[in-house]
Amino acid sequence: MDAGSHSISSEKSRAAAPRPPLQEAGSRPYMPSLSTGSRNPSAKCYGDRFIPDRSAMDMDMAHYLLTEPRKDKENAVGVVASPSKEAYRRLLAEKLLNNRTRILAFRNKPPEPENVSFAEAASSNLQAKPAKQRRHIPQSAERTLDAPELVDDYYLNLLDWGSNNVLSIALGDTVYLWDASSGSTSELVTVDEDSGPITSVSWAPDGRHIAVGLNSSDVQLWDTSSNRLLRTLRGVHEARVGSLAWNNSILTTGSMDGKIVNNDVRIRNHVVQTYEGHSQEVCGLKWSGSGQQLASGGNDNLLHIWDVSMASSMPSAGRNQWLHRLEDHTAAVKALAWCPFQSNLLATGGGGSDRCIKFWNTHTGACLNSVDTGSQVCALLWNKNERELLSSHGFTQNQLTLWKYPSMVKMAELTGHTSRVLFMAQSPDGCTVASAAADETLRFWNVFGAPEAPKPAAKASHTGMFNSFNHIR
Amino acid sequence: MASRTASKDIITLRGSAAIVSEFFGYAANSILYNRAVYPEESFTKVKKYGLTMLLTQDEGVKTFIASLTSQLSEWLEAGKLQRIVLVIMSKATNEVLERWNFNIVTDAEVVEKGAIKEKSDKEIMREIQAIMRQIASCITYLPCLDEPCVFDVLAYTDTDVDAPGTWVESDAKLISNPQMVKLHSFDTKIHKVDTLVSYKKDEWDEEE
């Protein structure tokens, strides 16, 4: 298997093997071409990675091309291979690539993985579709709702869309619920002036309970089916609670005091873990889809990845070490989004003086890509049905930008908001996005298209959903 | 003390075979994790090669890889293993999506005459570490595997090898018109391992 013999033998094959003139480039033995000038997409293109190391070349491919029956080639030229030619070919193949190897595989195959997650099941439906057609992306909002007294504060998280298809938004001291199936609005709670305004809202995964973070540092838990206050988590933080994230029955709270606390809402002493790593306000907080890792972003320009397995191994005093501390952003990190189709991929967006969207492998802590968007990144959402990312921005255009992943080609820019688009939330079926901006409007965009396997119930609710301009109160 | 350090740098055929087969076990685990062939939760972290590596906890996969590496080290000691290929296939269609090639060149002199080579553990570890880092960073350019996948391992051996009954002949499971990326190599001075990943071009790229 030394390099020398290979190079000689392939020289020989090139010189000796008679090649008909009208042969397609594709049926030649694999020879990576150095010229990348060919712009013709139909031409066989082996990509931009030329590998000059012969010992690492795929000789299997060469073997396959040399030994396969040349039906297509002969048809192209219109001659049947003469027996002598066939014999010559076989002889050549034997000489060059004589069967020196046996390819063996285990009789017992490794166990097949079970379907990993919902996201993967969804994308295998996608696979069944033979050809993907370009979908139409509406350029304007499908519906606009008034959102008066929406607090224009980058560091808060005032919008969430629950699994029950009900949207929650905090306007000033009041939390409103807007049922996307019926279009009806209800008021959940108005807090008194000294504990307000509300600084964060987050639906529990069950779609029934909702956590409300307050300026006074308290966190309230509400049951929306009976409009009842279940409990108030007090004394957890020393300043306002601007970010919330659920991981099953754990409610993680991030505060202006820089602390992140895991609260088990089922038990009396609800504080189970504290993550200390930020020196300023925690404004972004998201659990990964598997619930294994927590990403937190702060006004101190830091992004931390915390791992559950590291937390359990160090129970002492509830203090925990981060898995990664990532210092690449140069402004506050608020926009965080875990990729639904690749478990250790995280997208983050930086504030006004950073303007970048960055992608991270959270297992290794490596920054995979960084794109300057030219504007403050306020929120990020992945499309659950396609490999796309939506970002919302501030000055100058106050737009929503849809990016193709991983190429990061801009697919659409959605304008309409007249001030920075602070918050975004995605409908449970993944196709509609709600955005709330400092212009005190809440807009709905049909940006992510219909899911590949539409659920009839969800579909029906959507056709009747966007028809008029409504006031939320 | 001096004699001890000296003996550390000497590498035997047996030791080299152990290094290579162990490397393959970790590399396979790392590929299965990074390419999300098995769910993230089924892996645990261990320290190895100065890195945090992930090992599967799935009993079936564990036994598969363990029996695989023990057979590989036997063949490596005999100098009869030419290549190991880890193939990732679509579970639904069995279409081959990725081939991770580990090309092995064995120093014939060592196998035939039992010569002994010198190379420090540290240096080998550093080379392996570079490969492991590359495997972990591959998701930057490899197309997303957005369907459930299965894997298989192919061993390319000399024709005169005795294969136990647990092994069967296989086809090469090739990808037509593949993209290839060569990764780092490592060399124990007895076995030289070249790593290369070939993958099916993402059709989705060409739409643009």
Image (cartoon, helix red, strand yellow):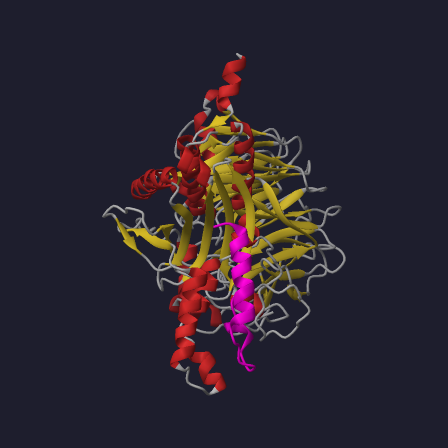
Residue sitting nearer the eye, A361 or A467 = A361
Eyeballing the image, is A449 above or below A85? above
Q: Residue furthest left?
A: B165
Instruction: Give the quarter of the figure containing the C terminus of chain A.
Output: bottom right
Q: Position of residue A24 (x, y in %)?
A: 54, 77
Relative image position of residue A116 (x, y in whole percent): 38, 51
Q: Residue at x 72, y 57 (%)?
A: A419
Rendering coords of residue A394 (x, y %): 71, 54
Give the total of numbered labels: 0
At 35% across and 41% down in the image, what residue appears? B75
In which quarter of the view is residue A445 placed?
A: bottom right
Query: For residue A3: magenta?
Result: yes
* Outermost residue, top side: B1
Q: Is residue B49 above or below residue A145?
A: above
- The magenta-colored residue range is A1-29
Is A327 left or right of A129, judged from the image as shown?
A: right
Image quarter of residue A248? top left
Which one is nearer the viewer's eye here, A66 or A388?
A66
Outermost residue, bottom direction? Answer: A78
Q: Which residue is at 46% across, 62% downward?
A: A96
Task: Let me know if residue A6 appears in the view.
Answer: yes
Q: Position of residue B40 (x, y in %)?
A: 42, 44
A275 in relation to A108, above or below = above
Compared across the picture, whether A90 is left or right of A244 comes to left
* Lateral position of residue A239 relative to residue B98, left or right: right
Q: In the rendered structure, does residue A183 fall within the stretch colored magenta?
A: no
Residue A265 visible in the displayed image: no
A23, B108: nearer the viewer: B108
